[in-house]
Image: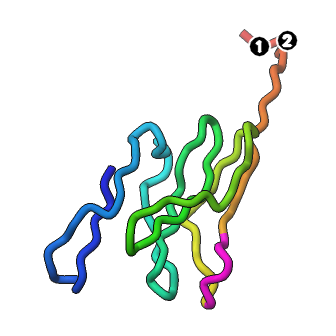
């Protein structure tokens, strides 16, 4: 996936950064969210079974991790939001857990 930037908005665009398709969630639509000062985008990227938040600098496309949930299956439930001062990011975060259960005496 490519993220493009144009300055001014109606000017010619250029590639800001490229993201590997394997890093994109199959269940979430890629929706980068611009910080209030316009200096960063926050994107959700897969790291194995985990979704982490990363920022993309709008001036040079550099990526920086914001979260590191390790190997715990973690997902972000919906689109994220910046605080009005741009110092915090809000996200609905869930932990994936699974158990193996034996069901017996099922009706046929």
Q: Position of residue 69 (x, y in %)?
A: 73, 48
Residue on which disc 2 sits: 104
- Seen in the picture, residue 101 relative to 97 is either above or below; the reply is above
Q: Magenta segment, principal secondary structure? A: loop
- Seen in the picture, residue 73 relative to 1 is either above or below; the reply is above
Which residue: 15% across, 81% down?
A: 11
Q: Position of residue 52 (x, y in %)?
A: 62, 52
Residue on which disc 1 sits: 107
Neighbor class of circle 2 (other Cα within 10 Å; few <14, some 14-19, many 20+) is: few
Quadrant for the C terminus, please: top right
Q: Position of residue 19 (x, y in %)?
A: 39, 49
Which residue: 63% across, 55% down?
A: 76
Q: Is residue 86 magenta?
A: yes
Q: Is residue 17 left or right of residue 50?
A: left
- Region in magenta: 85-90
Neighbor class of circle 1 (other Cα within 10 Å; few <14, some 14-19, many 20+) is: few
- Seen in the picture, residue 78 relative to 45 is either above or below; the reply is below
The quadrant in which residue 100 appears is: top right
The quadrant in which residue 103 appears is: top right
């Amino acid at each position: 996936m490519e993220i493009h930037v144009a300055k001014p908005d109606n000017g010619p665009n250029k590639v800001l950064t490229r993201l590997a398709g394997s890093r994109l969630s199959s269940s979430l639509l890629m929706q980068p969210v611009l910080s209030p000062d316009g200096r960063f985008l926050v994107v959700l990227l897969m790291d194995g079974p985990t979704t982490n938040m990363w920022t993309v600098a709008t001036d040079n496309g550099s990526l920086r991790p914001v979260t590191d949930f390790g190997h715990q299956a973690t997902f972000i439930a919906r689109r994220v939001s910046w605080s009005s001062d741009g110092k915090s990011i809000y996200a609905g975060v869930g932990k994936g857990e699974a158990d193996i259960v034996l069901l017996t005496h099922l009706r046929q």
